Image: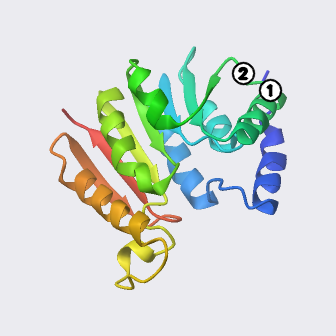
Protein backbone atom coordinates (compact mmCIF):
# COMPACT_ATOMS: atom_id res chain seq x y z
CA UNK A 1 0.00 0.00 0.00
CA UNK A 2 1.51 3.32 -1.06
CA UNK A 3 2.23 5.85 1.67
CA UNK A 4 1.71 9.15 -0.15
CA UNK A 5 1.93 11.10 3.12
CA UNK A 6 5.71 10.89 2.74
CA UNK A 7 5.40 13.33 -0.20
CA UNK A 8 5.20 16.22 2.29
CA UNK A 9 8.69 15.34 3.53
CA UNK A 10 10.04 15.02 -0.04
CA UNK A 11 8.58 18.40 -0.97
CA UNK A 12 10.04 20.06 2.15
CA UNK A 13 13.48 18.61 1.37
CA UNK A 14 13.24 19.78 -2.26
CA UNK A 15 12.24 23.34 -1.37
CA UNK A 16 14.86 23.67 1.40
CA UNK A 17 17.64 22.38 -0.85
CA UNK A 18 16.58 24.39 -3.91
CA UNK A 19 15.97 21.25 -5.96
CA UNK A 20 13.70 22.02 -8.92
CA UNK A 21 10.37 20.47 -8.00
CA UNK A 22 6.93 21.40 -9.28
CA UNK A 23 5.30 24.54 -7.96
CA UNK A 24 2.00 23.91 -6.15
CA UNK A 25 -0.23 25.49 -8.80
CA UNK A 26 1.56 23.61 -11.59
CA UNK A 27 1.20 20.33 -9.70
CA UNK A 28 -2.51 21.03 -9.07
CA UNK A 29 -3.14 21.73 -12.74
CA UNK A 30 -1.30 18.62 -13.98
CA UNK A 31 -2.78 16.24 -11.41
CA UNK A 32 -6.30 17.49 -12.25
CA UNK A 33 -5.55 16.81 -15.89
CA UNK A 34 -4.19 13.31 -15.06
CA UNK A 35 -7.26 12.48 -12.99
CA UNK A 36 -9.37 13.16 -16.13
CA UNK A 37 -7.05 11.25 -18.50
CA UNK A 38 -6.36 8.20 -16.27
CA UNK A 39 -3.13 7.44 -18.17
CA UNK A 40 -1.70 3.95 -18.48
CA UNK A 41 1.79 5.07 -19.50
CA UNK A 42 3.56 8.33 -18.64
CA UNK A 43 7.02 9.40 -19.79
CA UNK A 44 8.73 12.07 -17.70
CA UNK A 45 11.90 13.79 -18.89
CA UNK A 46 13.61 15.10 -15.73
CA UNK A 47 13.08 13.11 -12.53
CA UNK A 48 14.97 15.22 -9.96
CA UNK A 49 14.15 13.56 -6.60
CA UNK A 50 11.01 11.80 -7.86
CA UNK A 51 8.48 14.27 -6.41
CA UNK A 52 6.40 14.74 -9.56
CA UNK A 53 6.57 11.09 -10.70
CA UNK A 54 5.37 9.91 -7.28
CA UNK A 55 2.53 12.44 -7.37
CA UNK A 56 1.59 11.39 -10.90
CA UNK A 57 1.57 7.70 -9.92
CA UNK A 58 -1.63 8.28 -7.93
CA UNK A 59 -3.52 8.85 -11.18
CA UNK A 60 -2.31 5.89 -13.24
CA UNK A 61 -4.77 3.46 -14.67
CA UNK A 62 -4.57 0.00 -13.05
CA UNK A 63 -1.30 -1.70 -13.98
CA UNK A 64 0.04 1.58 -15.38
CA UNK A 65 3.66 2.76 -15.24
CA UNK A 66 5.80 5.87 -15.38
CA UNK A 67 9.19 5.90 -17.11
CA UNK A 68 11.24 8.83 -15.84
CA UNK A 69 14.69 9.92 -17.06
CA UNK A 70 17.35 11.62 -14.94
CA UNK A 71 20.93 12.53 -15.84
CA UNK A 72 22.39 13.19 -12.36
CA UNK A 73 23.44 10.08 -10.40
CA UNK A 74 22.79 11.65 -6.99
CA UNK A 75 19.26 12.62 -8.01
CA UNK A 76 18.64 9.10 -9.33
CA UNK A 77 19.73 7.69 -5.97
CA UNK A 78 17.46 10.10 -4.07
CA UNK A 79 14.53 9.45 -6.41
CA UNK A 80 14.86 5.66 -6.02
CA UNK A 81 15.01 6.05 -2.25
CA UNK A 82 11.89 8.27 -2.22
CA UNK A 83 9.98 5.97 -4.58
CA UNK A 84 10.75 3.04 -2.26
CA UNK A 85 9.75 4.98 0.88
CA UNK A 86 6.37 5.78 -0.64
CA UNK A 87 6.06 2.19 -1.91
CA UNK A 88 5.45 2.85 -5.61
CA UNK A 89 8.49 1.08 -7.08
CA UNK A 90 6.13 -1.18 -9.07
CA UNK A 91 4.71 1.92 -10.80
CA UNK A 92 7.84 3.99 -11.55
CA UNK A 93 10.92 3.03 -13.55
CA UNK A 94 13.87 5.43 -13.30
CA UNK A 95 16.18 5.50 -16.32
CA UNK A 96 19.59 7.02 -15.60
CA UNK A 97 21.42 8.98 -18.28
CA UNK A 98 21.11 11.83 -20.73
CA UNK A 99 17.55 11.89 -22.07
CA UNK A 100 18.83 12.51 -25.60
CA UNK A 101 20.80 9.24 -25.39
CA UNK A 102 17.89 7.27 -23.92
CA UNK A 103 14.90 8.60 -25.87
CA UNK A 104 15.92 7.14 -29.28
CA UNK A 105 15.76 3.65 -27.73
CA UNK A 106 12.25 4.02 -26.33
CA UNK A 107 9.57 2.56 -28.57
CA UNK A 108 6.54 2.41 -26.31
CA UNK A 109 3.56 4.64 -26.86
CA UNK A 110 2.73 6.95 -23.97
CA UNK A 111 -0.54 8.62 -22.99
CA UNK A 112 1.31 11.57 -21.46
CA UNK A 113 4.83 12.95 -21.98
CA UNK A 114 5.95 15.48 -19.37
CA UNK A 115 9.01 17.61 -20.18
CA UNK A 116 10.82 19.22 -17.24
CA UNK A 117 14.58 19.03 -17.83
CA UNK A 118 17.30 21.12 -19.50
CA UNK A 119 15.55 24.15 -21.01
CA UNK A 120 18.03 24.41 -23.88
CA UNK A 121 17.02 20.93 -25.11
CA UNK A 122 13.24 21.33 -25.14
CA UNK A 123 13.12 21.36 -28.96
CA UNK A 124 14.90 17.98 -29.16
CA UNK A 125 12.79 16.54 -26.32
CA UNK A 126 9.68 17.70 -28.16
CA UNK A 127 10.66 15.84 -31.36
CA UNK A 128 10.97 12.61 -29.36
CA UNK A 129 7.74 13.31 -27.47
CA UNK A 130 5.87 13.61 -30.79
CA UNK A 131 7.17 10.20 -31.84
CA UNK A 132 6.39 8.52 -28.52
CA UNK A 133 2.95 9.92 -27.65
CA UNK A 134 -0.28 8.22 -28.73
CA UNK A 135 -2.89 10.00 -30.83
CA UNK A 136 -5.28 11.32 -28.20
CA UNK A 137 -2.39 11.68 -25.74
CA UNK A 138 -0.86 14.78 -24.18
CA UNK A 139 2.52 16.56 -24.14
CA UNK A 140 3.03 18.91 -21.20
CA UNK A 141 6.15 21.07 -20.76
CA UNK A 142 7.00 23.03 -17.60
CA UNK A 143 9.02 26.24 -17.04
CA UNK A 144 8.49 27.44 -20.60
CA UNK A 145 8.31 31.10 -19.55
CA UNK A 146 11.59 30.75 -17.64
CA UNK A 147 11.03 33.25 -14.80
CA UNK A 148 9.26 35.61 -17.21
CA UNK A 149 12.36 36.04 -19.42
CA UNK A 150 10.79 34.34 -22.45
CA UNK A 151 8.07 36.99 -22.69
CA UNK A 152 10.30 39.99 -21.93
CA UNK A 153 12.26 42.11 -24.41
CA UNK A 154 15.30 42.17 -22.18
CA UNK A 155 17.89 40.09 -23.99
CA UNK A 156 21.17 40.63 -22.15
CA UNK A 157 20.95 37.91 -19.53
CA UNK A 158 23.37 35.00 -19.60
CA UNK A 159 20.49 32.60 -20.24
CA UNK A 160 19.86 34.21 -23.64
CA UNK A 161 20.47 30.95 -25.55
CA UNK A 162 18.02 28.99 -23.38
CA UNK A 163 15.46 31.79 -23.67
CA UNK A 164 15.74 31.88 -27.48
CA UNK A 165 15.45 28.09 -27.66
CA UNK A 166 12.34 28.18 -25.46
CA UNK A 167 10.79 30.80 -27.75
CA UNK A 168 11.44 28.50 -30.71
CA UNK A 169 9.99 25.60 -28.73
CA UNK A 170 6.78 27.51 -27.91
CA UNK A 171 6.39 28.51 -31.58
CA UNK A 172 6.89 24.88 -32.71
CA UNK A 173 4.32 23.62 -30.22
CA UNK A 174 1.72 26.25 -31.02
CA UNK A 175 2.11 25.89 -34.80
CA UNK A 176 2.21 22.08 -35.00
CA UNK A 177 -0.82 20.82 -36.91
CA UNK A 178 -0.88 17.51 -35.05
CA UNK A 179 -1.56 19.34 -31.80
CA UNK A 180 -4.14 21.50 -30.12
CA UNK A 181 -1.97 23.51 -27.75
CA UNK A 182 -2.26 26.23 -25.17
CA UNK A 183 0.32 28.27 -23.32
CA UNK A 184 -0.69 28.75 -19.70
CA UNK A 185 0.75 31.30 -17.31
CA UNK A 186 0.61 28.83 -14.44
CA UNK A 187 3.67 28.63 -12.20
CA UNK A 188 6.67 29.25 -14.45
CA UNK A 189 4.64 28.67 -17.63
CA UNK A 190 3.21 25.47 -19.11
CA UNK A 191 2.49 24.33 -22.63
CA UNK A 192 -0.29 21.76 -22.75
CA UNK A 193 -0.76 19.96 -26.08
CA UNK A 194 -3.45 17.46 -27.03
CA UNK A 195 -2.31 15.17 -29.85
CA UNK A 196 -5.20 15.14 -32.33
CA UNK A 197 -3.55 13.33 -35.26
Of the numbered discs 2 and 1, the one sitting upstream in the chain is 1
Q: Determine which quarter of the picture holds residue 153.
A: bottom left
Residue nearer the viewer, 102 or 21: 102
Q: Residue furthest top?
A: 63
Residue behind mark 1: 84
- In which quadrant of the rendered image does the N terminus lie? top right
Q: Is residue 81 above or below residue 154?
A: above
Display colour scheme: rainbow
Name which quarter of the figure residue 14 lies in: bottom right
151 relative position to 36: left or right = left
| Element type where label 2 sits in the image | loop
Query: Is residue 38 visible from the viewing direction of this image?
Result: no
Pointer 1: residues within 10 angstroms few (<14), some, or many (20+)? some
- Viewer-proximal residue, 125 or 151? 125
Please determine whether, in this image, residue 147 is positioned above or below residue 48: below
Give the quadrant of residue 18.
bottom right
For mark 2, what is the residue? 89
- Residue at x 82% of width, y 40% of height: 5
Query: Residue 53 at what x, y percent from top left?
Result: 62, 37
**Distance of label 2 from label 1 (alpha carbons):** 6 Å
Residue at 18% across, 53% down: 175
Image mark for residue 136: none
Residue placed most toward the observer, 94 or 100:
100
Q: Position of residue 63 (x, y in %)?
A: 57, 14
Q: Are marks 2 and 1 in contact (CB under 8 Å)?
A: yes
Around disc 2, counting alpha carbons within 10 Å, would you say few (fewer than 14), some (14 to 19), or many (20 or more)?
A: some
**Placement of 176 over or under 132, stated as above or below:** below
| Residue 188 coordinates in the image, percent (x, y) | 51, 65
Amino acid sequence: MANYEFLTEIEKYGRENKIPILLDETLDYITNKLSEIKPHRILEIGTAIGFSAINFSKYLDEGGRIDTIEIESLRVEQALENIEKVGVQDKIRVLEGDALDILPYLNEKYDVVFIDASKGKYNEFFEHALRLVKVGGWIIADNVLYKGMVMSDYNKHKQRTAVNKLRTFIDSVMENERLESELLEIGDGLTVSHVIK
